[in-house]
Amino acid sequence: MNIALIDYGAGNVPSVERAFQRLGAASRRIVRPADLASAGAIILPGVGHYAAIIRALDSQNLRSPLLEAVARRVPFLGICLGLQALYAGSEEAPALVGLGLLAGSVSSLPRTTKLPHMGWNRLRIVKPTPLFDGLGDSDYFYFAHTFAAPRSAEHAVAFCDYGTTFTAALQSGNIFATQFHPEKSGAAGARLLQNFLRLAAMRNFA
Amino acid sequence: MSLARRIIPCLDTDGDRVVKGVNFVGLRDAGDPAELAARYDSEGADELVVLDIAASRDRRPTFLETIRRVAAELAIPLTAGGGIRTLGDARSVVRAGADKITINTAAVERPQLISELSAEFGSQAVVLAIDATLELAGAEPRWDVRVRGGRDPAHLDALSWAQQGVELGAGEILLTSMDRDGTQGGYDITLTSVISRRVSVPVIASGGAKTPEHFAQVFSEGAADAALAASIFHDGSQSIRGLKQFLAARNIEVRFPC
């Protein structure tokens, strides 16, 4: 399968690449709009500031081809900022417009806890999904973020609690996304990526 | 709250080898960085830190190659540092595979570096390392910051510097007690507690770890979010799995790999 890894300079692109290599899957770094036309699956990684991902998508003219590919039901996996980018916008950069594939906007976690939310946390899987096949509420995943997506009952498949309850993983048709970093989450993260690849190959998203 | 306390082995490297003993005194070879990294990843380490203790310009390519080799073995986050003075230095370290950058002396000399790194990589990628030594004991103790591997005073109060660093954009504090480092007498619980309870970012305790009890103390009394150690893991005197089992039995939440 042709796995397109959108490379806009995000720090975690090499680790996502290595994580797929360990699963025996080769990904291709995408920097030009035309490269998305033949993608069998699209990965949007990200870490850092919301403005970086949105500005990069626009300056590399990737926004429209990305939205078109998602509309063609190409399997999509957003990681961290790649999840946040799916919403209408973010409190972190209020002037910028997100991809708007999901309703609502991203906001800061409460400042009553230590921020960034950094380290290994568990999830509450609230909707059965093949993305979490073989994984459960006792598995830990690695988080490194200050902003988070709203608790959206419609698309959320897993919540996480840190000062508040936020969406840790979601699925909407062919769109999958995680706030945590599966590429940094040891064996549990590898399992999730493998599940995504299997779903993408079957193109069966329910 | 189910955020686990983190156990972080540290690889002090000189050239392409891991060494034991800091401050350039009595350096002993402790193994190959990539081999140790693979071992710690499989034993359940939550993150890994790689430091270039020589941090000399001419050996920079060797250190970057070490980061690449270590990153290739890891499915957990990697922090790298030692001798990072500019945004350019940080970029090469990140490009080589580090998820976070740790800075120390250069940040004291030019605090703006913290903001520059934070703007480029996000605060979650900027770890401010502080080497502290007790200046005034008593009811309201104070610690001084030291730089250049602990050799020189920075004439800064450790708590104020930690708070300033967070304001400038540091997302984590790596706090080393120079008084405890290398003594194996346990972490400085008071230092860790004072800083950790008064900054808004996670604190990694470092310096002095020997027994599982030391880790339990620094998490429960010291309020540390993570604990770092080096030689006790390298020489096999403490296994990461055994340490986590000890902590779990004390109701300290830790992650066991699946």
Image (spheres, rainbow, N blue to C red):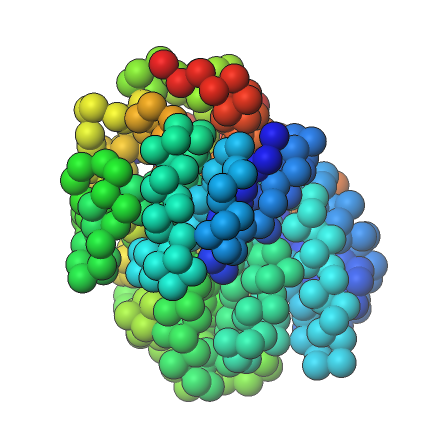
Image height check: is B108 above or below B175?
Answer: below
Image coordinates of residue A94 in percent, x first then y, are: 17, 59
The N terminus of chain A sits in image quarter: top right
Residue toward you, A44 or B181: A44
Taking the spot 31% from the left edge, 26% from the top edge, the residue there is A172
Q: Position of residue B236 (x, y in %)?
A: 74, 41
| Corner quadrant of residue B49 | bottom right
Q: Nearer the viewer, residue A102 or B12?
A: A102
Q: Residue at x 47, y 57 (%)?
A: A8
Q: How many marks?
A: 0
Q: Left or right: A187 with respect to B36?
A: left
Report whether residue A48 is seen. no
Asked if residue B192 lies left or right of residue B91, the reply is left
Q: Residue at x 25, y 50 (%)?
A: A98
* Front in this rendered view, residue B17 or A88: A88
**Closest to the observer: B4 or B118?**
B118
Which quadrant of the structure image shows residue A57? Answer: bottom left
